[in-house]
Amino acid sequence: MPQDPLSNNQAEIRSKTKLSKDHPKIDDYLRSFPSAPDAASRKRKREKFTTEGARKVRSVRNKGACVACHYRKTPCSVDEICAHCLKAVKNDYSLAKEICVRNKMQDSYFGVKTIAIFGSLEARKGALDPLLQSLSGNSYPVELSVKSSIGSSDTAVLPLRVRQCDLGRTCRWKGLSKVKGIYITSKSIYAPRYAVIPGCVSFANVEKFSCQVLSLSLSHSGGITRFLDDFMSTYSHYSRSTELREFVRSSRSVVGLNGLVSYGSLEIRDGSYELLNLPPTDIPFVGPTVHDQIRLLAAGGLEIAEKTVFSQIDSFKKLVGPNKHARIVGGICLLRLLLLYRDRVLRDAIRVSLPREKILHRERLEQSSFMYRRLTVAYGILCRDANTPITTSWVAESDSVKWTKEDNILQTQFSRLQDAYKDFCKLSVQLARNHANLPKGDTLTDEHDDLFKGVVVNSRP
Ligand SMILES: [Zn+2]
Ligand SMILES: [Zn+2]
């Protein structure tokens, strides 16, 4: 006999209320339960409790549970800082205030749109348009390139074709120099303006280039970002498509494209400088128009990738859930993203400390700092004391009998990453004080990393 869909509910109500042993029908409840003002006092008490509970649940619901409670399915409170978060940081009120957040990532992130120096993408495009309509003369093949900054002879190359502009014939070329670990304009010359011929480079190629650059450049957080990038690269190239893999791909896009869009992170060289018939120089020169065009192309794609990534982080409970493999992989992406913003914090802080500091440099520093902290909160939710997504044992996507070549590679890359991660966290606690001559940034600092130290590193028992 097929089960009556109501009978489950009925059983549930019965077990909760324990009102009757003679198996009443659901209709009996519908008649007597809500319309029984003069029922027994025991029942009234329960109703009062239920109303009180419901009110509490309702007000938490209105305010929204904090992201940690939402993820862990623990009951949150309406207080500004919930008990759960306060306990998680051992009653450190100022840390708790930062981790008990209720707004969604996608409603609060500072993305490419708000990179102050860049203005709005539309305005920037509008300013470029007249120049691009005035291209004339021969078309020349050039290469935008980034040399390895980790000692290898590799170079990432993006082939382009340029033509000279008739409008605004001359422009200010920027020669980049490394100052305290960041690239700033140190030399400039006025020379003929070249621009990329519209349509000669696709966004897909720009994205590919940006990911190649990742494997050649050193971050301010030392070796660990390389290992994260290697892992994410292998993972995203694996053919079977899953939601988790999509998250890895879009995270990787965000990291790669950010490098191209944000200023001062790359020793980028613009091939069109060689067309100027000037004596060769070691200083990499970038034509502002070519650079802008590539940054704009990257920024357009970055805007989309960011939207995807931050909404995926908001639904992390669904994406990761109880799946141990997903927790590791999701954690790796969150760690990479937070280190991206940490890098920017350190770079922006250096920029602010240099002469000719502008308000926008300060604004950028505040924005990168906000993102670094907010992503640290997201990563912290996946950590339980000493058990973090990176320090746990490797769990493959498929069970061990079905292991593929990729599973083996990922396991090896994960174990390298674990060592780098342990170093990164250990540095923060002891070595930072003892090794003053370690490059700044390789160690967690008191100034910028308090939240990461508080919720990830120091939360060990
Ligand atoms: Zn909470
Ligand atoms: Zn909370």
Image (tube, grey):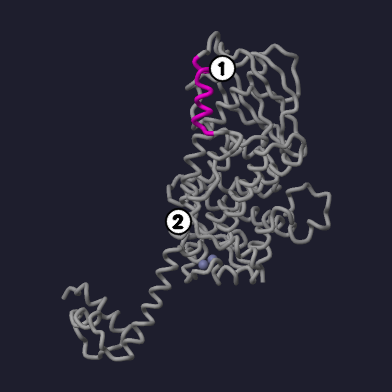
Residue 114, by quadrant, is top right
Q: Answer above or below: position of 18 versus 8.
A: below
Q: Quadrant of the C terminus?
A: bottom right
Residue 115: image location, x then y, percent: 58, 38
Residue 304 among those drawn in magenta = no
- Mark 2 nearby-residue class (10 Å; few <14, some 14–19, many ≥20): some
In what element is the residue under mark 1?
Answer: strand
Q: Answer above or below: position of 407 versus 77.
A: above
Residue 361: image location, x then y, percent: 67, 39
Q: Residue furthest front?
A: 37
Numbered badge on residue 44: none
Q: Is mark 1 within 8 Å of ligand 2?
A: no
Residue at numbered disc 1: 162
Residue 228: image location, x then y, percent: 61, 49
Q: Residue at x 51, y 32 (%)?
A: 121
Please name the amino acid that badge 2 sits on.
Answer: Ser
In what element is the residue under mark 2?
Answer: loop
Determine contact: label 2, label 1, CB under 8 Å: no
Is residue 448 or residue 326 the one in the foreground?
448
Residue at numbered disc 2: 315
Q: Which residues are magenta?
A: 120-133
Precedes in sequence: disc 2 or disc 1: 1
Q: Answer above or below: position of 149 versus 439.
A: above
Please name the amino acid that badge 1 sits on.
Answer: Val
- C-alpha span from label 2 to label 1: 43 Å
Q: Residue at x 49, y 32 (%)?
A: 204
Q: Answer with left or right where residue 283 lies relative to residue 399.
A: right
Residue 125 among those drawn in magenta = yes
Residue 262: image location, x then y, percent: 61, 37
Q: Answer above or below: position of 206 versus 422.
A: above
- Mark 1 nearby-residue class (10 Å; few <14, some 14–19, many ≥20): many
Q: Residue at x 51, y 29 (%)?
A: 123
